Amino acid sequence: MARKSLVLLSLLVLVIGVQLATSMTSTQYYLTQLTMSAYYAIVVIGLSVLMGYAGQISIGHAGFFAIGGYLSAALTTHNLIQFQESGVVKLLSSLGMIVTGQDLYGEELLVFVPWAACIVAIITAGVIAFVLGIPVLKLKGHYLAMATLGFGIIIYRIALASEYFGEADGISEVPGFTIFPALGDIGPVVVSGDFSGRVQNYYIAWCMLIIGLILLQNLINSRVGRALRSIHGSEEAAEAMGVNTARYKLYVFVLSAVYAAIAGVFLTHYNGGIGPSEASVMKSVRYVALVAVGGMANLWGVLIMGVSLTFLSLRGVFGSYDDAIFGVILIMIMLFAPEGILSIKLKGLFFRKNIRAKQEA
Amino acid sequence: MLELSSLQKNFGGLKAVDDVSFQVAKGTIKAVIGPNGAGKTTLFNCIAGNLAPTSGSIFFQNQEIKGKKPHQIAALGISRTFQNINLFHGMTALENVMVGRHIRSTSGFLAGMFSLPKSWKEEKKIQQRSVELLDILDLSKFAHVEATSLAFGQQRGVELARALATDPSLLLLDEPAAGLNIYETAEVARLITKIRDMGITVLLVEHDMSLVMDISDEIVVLSFGSKIAEDIPSAIQQNSEVIKIYLGEDEEAMA
Ligand SMILES: Nc1ncnc2c1ncn2[C@@H]1O[C@H](COP(=O)(O)OP(=O)(O)O)[C@@H](O)[C@H]1O
Ligand SMILES: [Mg+2]
């Protein structure tokens, strides 16, 4: 327990340290990519619980990311003024979910507030994961991989084909997402790409990632986490021990989809837009590669690799071979280091931690 | 406690279990024996819900359990071990046993994620009970060793502890002594008697007759899916049909 807090504390110190270092060296432009990396890492740690711990693969998580991002973008940008007399719009307005505003050209705008859009987007992603998961999670191994891949392709084609989602251009001019309004002297907390909010957004993203990590760590170390690992270990035996394997697989699938959708929503408001590449199969493959390279059932490893490789990718280090690099990483890991490249170094650390935890208990 | 009537399981044209009926009385050890391929494991898989019987019925504590899922049957109080050891790989011996407590605990996803007091209090109890069970089976020194890396006999022990962790009222053991030497087999025999004395009814499958003769209260003999005899051990030993099957299949089996 103490060790776990210590590791978390060091991460916190590191996060703050990096921010201070960038401001001292006037290299704050790094914060932009670090913010984005943190959001992508949220997808990856969620997927790690699904793949590494519960042993169920998904090559469609970019789809859930896109559902979150696109829905939030569409709801906060598409003008509903022509429907203003409809009962639904009136009801939503009275609930404060839809507000009037003005666009850049001073025209009257009737759109969802980001809070409402965010909730709708995340719930929708969760419901879709639930409905998709019921039939699909009956499949195993390659068949499950193919089915989730198919889902990802469908979402990609929908994003690319539908006018509502902006076709090949995607959706832009997505407004900032005010998490907390201003309170007296304390300014508002807004997720947006505003230059002035760069430091704030860096901290928002990393807070979300760290909270997300803590929740998943708790889960893994709980009764449910053990049941999930037992499904990975032997589904037949897990079932014989009374684990409702179908339900647990479904719930963890929904959970990982919700993580992806949350990342999609926040990154979209941060970037001010979203495009079809976020829904592409290559993005899903990239997430799987990051989980694999981090060691699958290793939340810390997955987080570290997820952040660092995504950061390099966003800095353009891989150039036009970007997608290819992640494909190669996936193949290499599968061939030479199925436990992830951090497994060797981290093994000592984690092994000691386990013994400690057990002695304390 | 358990009542099978006219249970039938076909695999295509093969009648793996053919019109089998018998009862298991509470607090007894009942053994199902028969040569390889007689349908013993198939019978177990039908009871535990892993296979759907073709016809017939299975009553457990006066409740029809045919058609229920394995996890529902486990919740009702039937636990099992597997003929081919089926431990959770990637988990320690202790964690394996702790999974056995799953059905007797309730913390869900949210309780786990937010580490609610309910969750960790329950977790402590789960761990306590699991350590106790490993102790009973003399395996506590392997608690933190990955279960699948243990010696064969120890793996069987962990599987047994895991099955006991579910607090079963009926325990199904599929060839618990397979692959063990005579000392380990004697130890298993002692354990099974102990489990019965704890008030748990045991239904035991064995290929080898020598183990079951000593400890069983009653024996059912299967051959090619059909029940050919059901009696107390001393009578089974005298049964000419049983002797014929066993001598025909393998002379050593009677030794
Ligand atoms: N899943 C299955 N599909 C087809 N045939 C099976 C299956 N399981 C068992 N059998 C067949 O059923 C018969 C009984 O097998 P089993 O119950 O394993 O016997 P035992 O446990 O008594 O050795 C064997 O002939 C076996 O080949
Ligand atoms: Mg068998």
Image (cartoon, coloured by chain):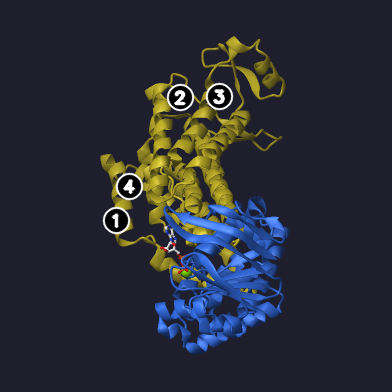
Tag 3: amino acid: Leu
> What distance separates the C-alpha of mark 1 from that of mark 3?
41 Å
Residue B82 drawn at (x, y percent): 51, 68
Residue found at x 29% / y 45%:
A318
Tag 4: amino acid: Phe
Q: Nearer the viewer, residue A349 or B110?
A: B110
Report the image quarter containing ligand 1: bottom left
Residue B204 drawn at (x, y percent): 57, 73
**Which disc is residue A326 wearing?**
4
Marks 4 and 1 on same chain: yes
> Residue under circle 3?
A75
Marks 2 and 1 on same chain: yes
Residue found at x 62% / y 74%:
B30
> What distance separates the C-alpha of mark 2 from that of mark 1?
36 Å
Residue A31 drawn at (x, y percent): 46, 43
Residue found at x 48% / y 37%:
A65
Which chain is displayed in yellow in the rendered image?
A
Q: In this view, does A30 lie above or below A350?
A: above
Question: Which of the chains bears the disc numbered 2?
Answer: A
> Residue under circle 2?
A171
Question: Which image quadrant: the C terminus of chain A?
Answer: bottom right
Q: In the rendered picture, chain B carries what hue?
A: blue
Q: In this view, does B185 lie above or below B8?
A: below
